[in-house]
């Protein structure tokens, strides 16, 4: 598959995730995105369970394709591919959330790897030079910082009324990271093809 097409899936992953979340919230009924967790939308027996499952499976597939495009670009440009591999923790967790809905015990277990996703922008900051990947330092810091706000979900006394809002900080952070990477890495491929 064409590397540029694979990289464009970086735009589609957030579209798939957020549209699934918003549409599932509408179908679920009486769902507040600030106070309720995303996984509740796919819980066994909910009206939104199958839309959630389908949308998250699609999101996981798109994110694997995105990782493949990023990896191919890293190989062609001589960039470290280590930051890219942490995106697979997201792919794995989203697929796990889709296939093992709440209240199944595997839902929480398979969802945990995504807590390592913040390492992708952190390692991007440390390993990718700004002169080769324009704006990487700022983009990685912004994405990393917003993702870290999502870890407030592990502090029950902070914003205790808004667990959904805390969780969505994490999702906003990776959304920024994926969109940035899709845009910037497509630019790297274009530079290679022009030469």
Image: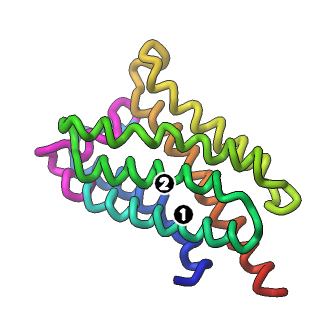
Front in this rendered view, residue 84 or 60: 84
- The residue that mark 1 highlights is 67
Q: How far apart, in angstroms, are the residues tagged by discs 1 and 2?
A: 7 Å
User: Quick one: which residue is furthest to the left in this view?
Assistant: 45
Quarter of the rendering occupied by the C terminus: bottom right
Give x and y (percent) for residue 141: 72, 41
Q: Residue at x 39, y 20 (%)?
A: 161
Q: Quadrant of residue 183?
A: bottom right
Scheme of image coloration = rainbow
Q: Circle 2 — which element? A: helix
Query: Label 1's element?
Result: helix
- 122 is within the stretch colored magenta: no
- Inspect the magenta stretch and tell me whether residue 47 lies in it: yes
Name the foreground residue: 98 vs 50.
Answer: 98
Q: Depth check: give the residue in front, 118 or 75.
A: 75
Mark number, residue 88: 2
Report the residue at 81% width, 87% height from top: 194
Q: Residues within 10 Å of mark 1 (few under 14, many from 20)?
A: many
Give residue 46's position: percent from left, percent from top. 15, 45
Q: Left or right? Give the position of 117 relative to 163.
A: right
The residue depicted at 11 percent of the width and 45 percent of the height is 45
Give the magenta range: 34-52
């Amino acid at each position: 598959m064409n590397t540029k097409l694979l990289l464009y899936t970086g735009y589609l992953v957030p579209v798939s995730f957020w549209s699934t979340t918003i549409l599932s919230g509408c179908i679920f009924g009486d769902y507040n995105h600030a106070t309720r967790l995303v996984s509740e939308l796919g819980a066994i027996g909910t009206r939104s369970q199958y839309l959630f499952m389908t949308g998250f499976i699609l999101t996981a597939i798109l994110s694997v394709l995105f990782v493949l495009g990023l990896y191919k670009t890293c190989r062609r440009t001589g960039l470290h591919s280590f930051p890219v591999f942490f995106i697979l923790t997201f792919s794995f967790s989203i697929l796990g959330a889709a296939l093992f809905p709440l209240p199944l015990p595997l839902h929480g277990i398979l969802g945990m790897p995504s807590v390592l996703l913040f390492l992708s922008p952190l390692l991007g900051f440390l390993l990718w030079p700004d002169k080769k990947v324009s704006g990487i330092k700022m983009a990685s810091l912004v994405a990393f910082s917003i993702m870290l706000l999502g870890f407030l979900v592990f502090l029950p006394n902070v914003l205790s009324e808004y667990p959904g809002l805390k969780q969505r900080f994490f999702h906003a952070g990776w959304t920024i990271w994926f969109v940035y990477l899709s845009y910037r890495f497509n630019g790297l491929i274009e530079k290679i093809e022009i030469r």
